[in-house]
Amino acid sequence: VLLDIGVSSHQLDTASRGFSFHEDAPLDMRMSQSGTTAEELVNRLPLGELKRILSVYGEEKYAQSIARGIVSARGEKPIKTTLELAEIVKENVPQKVRREGHPARKTFQALRIAVNRELEVLEKGLDSAFELLGSGGRLAVITFHSLEDRIVKQKMAGWCTGCTCPKDFPVCVCGNKPKAKLVNKKPVCANETELDKNPRARSAKLRICEKI
């Protein structure tokens, strides 16, 4: 089973979906056409929850400042488009951050993850995919950012863990046995040849485990 996690290039490149901060579009970010939009989140969530989402899902260093900027801006008028949000982020981070790539990247990632409940869906998807495997079957997972990769790494480590008894126990009393083994101890990353053809693969990591 192969799981290719996250938003697709087609979704990123379709401006009307609201995933990109490079073109102006409605602030949507839903992978399907149902559920809460990013526009609803940025205009309704309290300051503390906005900060939490930006900090946890975006690993954004300036989450507090950006969240305050969002709350201040929406007090004047609703935030409706991607470029409106991107400009708010830009205005609420230090000047040096603006020179290190687009400052809205982490904010957009955080909101997209929150809108689509991506990490929760990933957890459930991993368990379901592993259950489908027979002995000797392999689960391969491609992730594109550290939050996804951390979940996959921890999940696979759990499947590969056997006895959890303290080391000074003479015999195992927990009865735990490993359910899988790692095929690659370190994630596989794209080489320069692949990156020349597909620059978006730069952050991709492939982890594989085999069911026992």
Image (spheres, rainbow, N blue to C red):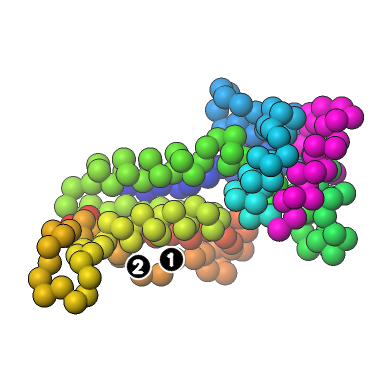
**Residue 20 in which image quadrant:** top right
Quarter the C terminus occupies? bottom left
**Residue 37 in which image quadrant:** top right
In the rendered image of this protein, does residue 40 appear above or below residue 178? above
- In the image shown, does 3 or 192 lie closer to the viewer? 3
List the single residue furthest toward the left.
171
**Residue 136 in which image quadrant:** bottom left
The region drawn magenta spans 61-87
In the rendered structure, the answer to whether residue 122 lies left or right of residue 157 reads right
- In the image shown, does 62 or 17 lie closer to the viewer? 62
Quick check: can you spot residue 39? no
x, y (%) of residue 42? 72, 34
Q: Residue at x 64, y 34 (%)?
A: 29
In the rendered image of this protein, does residue 137 appear above or below residue 20? below
Quick check: can you spot residue 115? yes
- Judge whether residue 128 is colored magenta: no
Element at label 2: loop
Element at label 1: loop
The three-letter code of the residue at mark 1 reads Pro
Q: Residue at x 87, y 49 (%)?
A: 91
Q: Give residue 184's mark.
A: 2
- Examine the residues drawn in magenta and state their main secondary structure: helix
In the rendered structure, the answer to whether residue 7 lies left or right of residue 137 reads right
Q: Residue at x 77, y 59 (%)?
A: 101
The three-letter code of the residue at mark 2 reads Asn
x, y (%) of residue 75? 85, 30
Q: Give residue 18's mark.
A: none
Q: Give residue 187's mark.
A: 1
